[in-house]
Amino acid sequence: MAEQALPAWKRTFEEAGSQILFLGNFFKNIFKSGFEWSEFVRQCYEIGYKSLTLVGLTGFIMGLVLTLQSRPTLADFGAESWLPGMVSLSIVREIGPVITAIICAGRVASSIGAELGSMNVTEQIDAMEVSGANPMQYLVVTRVLATTLMIPILTFISDAIALFGGYLAVNIDGKVSFYLYFTKAISVLGFSDIFPATIKTIFFGLTIGFIGCYKGINSNKGTESVGLAANSAVVTSSLWIFVIDAIAVQLTNLLAYH
Amino acid sequence: METTTNGTKNSATVPLKTEELVVEIRGLKKAFSGYEVLKNINLDLKRGENLVVLGKSGQGKSVTIKCIVGLLKKDDGSVKVFNEEVADLNDEQLKQLRTKIGFLFQNSALYDSMTVRENLEFPLTRVLKLQEQTEITSRVEEVLEGVGLLDAIDKMPSDLSGGMRKRIGLARTLIMKPEIMLYDEPTTGLDPITSREISELILEMQKKYKTSSIIITHDMPCAKITSDRVMVMNNGEYVAEGTYEELERSDNELVRSFFN
Ligand SMILES: Nc1ncnc2c1ncn2[C@@H]1O[C@H](COP(=O)(O)OP(=O)(O)OP(=O)(O)O)[C@@H](O)[C@H]1O
Ligand SMILES: [Mg+2]
């Protein structure tokens, strides 16, 4: 009631404030002694290994379709030989990181949000806190670090599979050698393509884990709030991924071309 | 405001009990988004005693004990544990305090991604920072033996019945050998025989480890078995206190209604 009376902008600021506090708390807890290695490894497995099929399949189709779509246009200009380079540039710089991150927002952020949300509803997080243990360290630090590490790795794998998909599309009539395609695809990639893209994916990973945990831990104490937490984790982290992407493009252009 | 029935606070009828207060709540207020749940709660817990808290559903019993461990922040009044104001403690001090308090949640709150063994090991390795695997195992087995569920050690919480979950929840708090135990409806939803066993377990804990306990319950046999003193609250206010026998004969309608 009192909360509903607050104007929307005020609530937005409150929410932003509490997210910043949560982020600060997260960073503080990374460096506390007693890092939860086994939970971290378990989360890496859950987040990384179990997303592999989905990410790989999407990457493959992405590369295939992108190549098939671009081919006629490039052929019109007689520039078909640019095809591998163009595909690899678009995939490594933009499409690979963003699509992988969006897929992981759907798969990983939602499951973290739902898991922590249901732990919150059933008072497991309270129980952890009351016992004197540190839920921030055990639940949040491990998950956020795991996504921060695994999303870049998943993106790398997805990029590679997408390039392979591109090769299959180029080679549809069997005239292009595997070696030639990959030399062409890789030779166009420079440091200024790979480095910013990697940095970007690290931030994507951080965002996915952080938003998932924040929404889960701060969910309300009703059963329906578990679904809400999962849902808003996906929506919010997807949104942030696009925002970060837009910022990253601007920064990369500034740094690379001036 | 305070209508203490009979006006007699029983004292030293049980030798375990002393007059030293381990929990002292005065004028506690707590509201949720404008709705006042606790209006004026006064509560004393003496060292070594079992205090049973009675009250209708939704009257803020759980909220009261959550204020004791700092899970909820009070709006007004004073909550002192071991003579220290809980709200004034910093994170480290609060953590220290919490290691001395055991909290049995109403719905057990077992960690459902861990086996029973891992649930019990969790506070030992994370809070007491025990390293020795043989010591950890022996403590886990000892406490499981105590609640009679040693054979459930490798089960997942989802494979346990409600009563078993409750007993594992109890084991997980008792493994820390707390000085204060807060039981939130330890016997609700259990059959009379299991309820009785749990009640006797609570008594045994009091004798064995000299714990001081607050027991929230609606289960009158449990209250009768475990209580040294009973407190009744209604509408977020303290209503009456006394021994079980005293309150049974109270002239207050509301108080008596719990007993029949
Ligand atoms: N975290 C919370 N946020 C908002 N309201 C809450 C919260 N916790 C409790 N309440 C409200 O406080 C009131 C008292 O709740 P509490 O759980 O203390 O009742 P109770 O006396 O323990 O009842 P029961 O015997 O059913 O467990 C309820 O109306 C509940 O909706
Ligand atoms: Mg309750």
Image: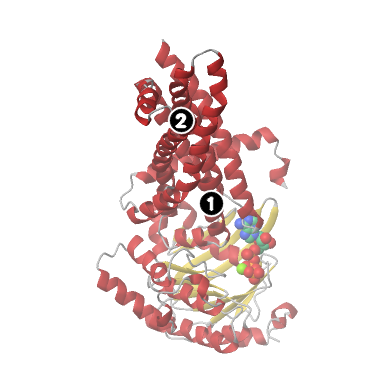
Residue B203 image position (x, y, % from top left): 47, 84
Toward the viewer: B87 or A174? A174
Residue B159 image position (x, y, % from top left): 51, 74
Q: Tell me if I can see residue A20 in this picture.
A: no
At a point 69% along the width and 81% down the height, the residue shown is B258
Tell whether A257 sits left or right of B39: left
Q: Where ligand 2 lies, by quadrant?
A: bottom right
Task: Please state which amino acid type lies under the numbered disc 2.
Answer: Asn
Q: Residue reaching furthest top? A: A258
At a point 43% along the width and 75% down the height, the residue shown is B171
| Residue A111, label in figure | 1
Toward the viewer: A65 or B181? A65
Mark 2, residue position: A171
Residue A170 image position (x, y, % from top left): 47, 28
At a point 44% along the width and 26% down the height, the residue shown is A88
Using a 10 Å C-alpha cutoff, classify the residue at mark 1 as few (fewer than 14 neighbours), some (14 to 19) or many (20 or more): many
Mark 2 vs mark 1, CA separation in Å:
39 Å
Residue B205 image position (x, y, % from top left): 42, 81
Q: Earlier in the sequence, mark 2 or mark 1?
A: 1
Q: Residue reaching furthest right? A: B253
Toward the viewer: B45 or B145? B145
Tell whether A227 sits left or right of A65: right
Give a yes or no on whether discs 2 and 1 share a subunit: yes
Toward the viewer: A247 or B80? A247
Task: Please state which amino acid type lies under the numbered disc 1.
Answer: Ser
